[in-house]
């Protein structure tokens, strides 16, 4: 048996120390050891959208619940982190798989929206999941998102597939067996991202209309969403975005929600005319 390295042991102890127990945790987490992967029996749940929060997942009309725990394999000196998020099953959840995929796609200008090198769609027991060797695994189970992460920079350690299999049993993947991570899928994902950005802007303006948020608070997020739309439009449809972005920032500085909403309408009209056009990937 290998000795536990100081870094590995400290990381696991730190993870165990910060995790507290909540009544909901056992509903979403496996709070017992899985094979050689030891669990302290503790988990923590709290409000939040989990790994897809960074995508701008629209949670303003519902509460998401995220639960976390961790495992440690002393023999292989491998720590594994688990994050399970229960989403609301509302309209915004139609984007869950798309948003999970976002974490495996580049946000660099040169590779915008392209899959990270090494990303694959794999299967265990008939359940499909997204995999990046040395990094982790993700899938959706209806409106639940499961994220299993670990770090193996040199690819020398066994994958924690026992843990993956256990969570697939608890939350069977609802990723279609027909899904293929090929160029055609990437082209569609990019077009869906343009759709999603505009959809998010509409949702934020609706929140303002319903007096659930202040216009000034909503505009910051709306401009961010529109900037993302413009980045993708420039990259794949050749429409320069510099002046458009400067105009949006100018409206934002003035708190001019009307002009920003007019721009949103303009972009939606442009997209309706151009979304059927083919795009060329690098």
Image (cartoon, grey):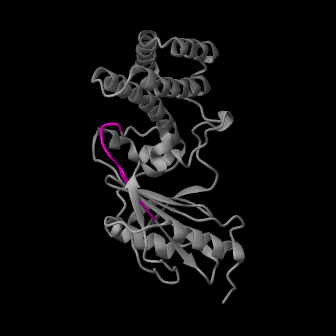
Tell me what residue is drawn at x 59 percent, y 41 percent.
114
**64 part of magenta stretch:** yes
Question: Is residue 248 shown left or right of residue 126?
Answer: right
Q: Is residue 263 above or below residue 190?
A: above
Picture quadrant where residue 29 is located: bottom left
Report x, y in % for residue 136: 55, 61
Where does the C terminus fall, quadrant-wise? top right
Decide if residue 232 is in sight here: yes
Report x, y in % for residue 104: 56, 49
Q: Is residue 248 above or below residue 174?
A: above
Picture quadrant where residue 209 is located: top left
Where does the N terminus fall, quadrant-wise? bottom right
Camera-side residue of 117 and 179: 117
Picture quadrant where residue 129 is located: bottom left
**4 part of magenta stretch:** no
Q: Residue furthest bottom?
A: 1
Tell me what residue is drawn at x 42 percent, y 64 percent.
44
Question: Is residue 185 shown left or right of residue 5?
Answer: left
Magenta span of residues? 60-68
Tell me what residue is drawn at x 39 percent, y 55 percent.
46
Camera-side residue of 259 and 142: 259
Tell me what residue is drawn at x 39 percent, y 73 percent.
30
Camera-side residue of 18 and 195: 18
Report x, y in % for residue 252: 52, 16
Report x, y in % for residue 2: 68, 86
Decide if residue 277 is in sight here: no
Q: Is residue 84 above or below residue 52?
A: below
């Amino acid at each position: 048996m290998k000795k536990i390295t100081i870094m590995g042991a400290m990381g696991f102890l730190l993870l165990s120390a910060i995790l507290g127990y909540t009544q909901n945790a056992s509903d979403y987490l496996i709070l017992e050891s899985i094979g050689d992967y030891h669990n302290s029996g503790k988990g923590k749940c709290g409000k939040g959208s989990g790994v897809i929060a960074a995508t701008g997942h629209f949670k303003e009309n519902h509460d998401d619940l995220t639960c976390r725990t961790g495992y440690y394999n002393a023999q292989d000196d491998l720590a594994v982190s688990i994050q399970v998020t229960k989403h609301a099953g509302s309209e915004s959840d139609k984007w869950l798989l798309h948003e999970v995929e976002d974490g495996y796609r580049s946000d660099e200008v040169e590779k915008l929206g392209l899959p990270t090198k090494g990303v694959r769609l794999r299967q265990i027991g008939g359940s499909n999941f997204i995999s990046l060797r040395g990094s982790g695994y993700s899938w959706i189970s209806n409106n639940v998102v499961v994220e299993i992460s670990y770090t193996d920079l040199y690819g020398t350690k066994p994958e924690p597939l026992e843990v993956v299999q256990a969570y697939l049993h608890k939350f069977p993947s609802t990723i279609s067996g027909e899904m293929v991570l090929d160029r055609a899928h990437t082209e569609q994902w990019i077009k869906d991202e343009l759709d999603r950005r505009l959809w998010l802007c509409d949702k934020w303006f609706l929140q303002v209309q319903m007096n659930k948020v202040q216009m000034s608070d909503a505009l910051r997020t709306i401009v961010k969403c529109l900037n993302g739309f413009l980045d993708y439009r420039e990259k794949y449809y050749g429409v320069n975005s510099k002046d458009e972005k400067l105009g949006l920032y100018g409206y934002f500085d003035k708190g001019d929600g009307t002009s920003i909403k007019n721009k949103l309408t303009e972009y939606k009209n442009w997209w309706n005319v151009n979304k059927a056009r083919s795009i060329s990937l690098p």
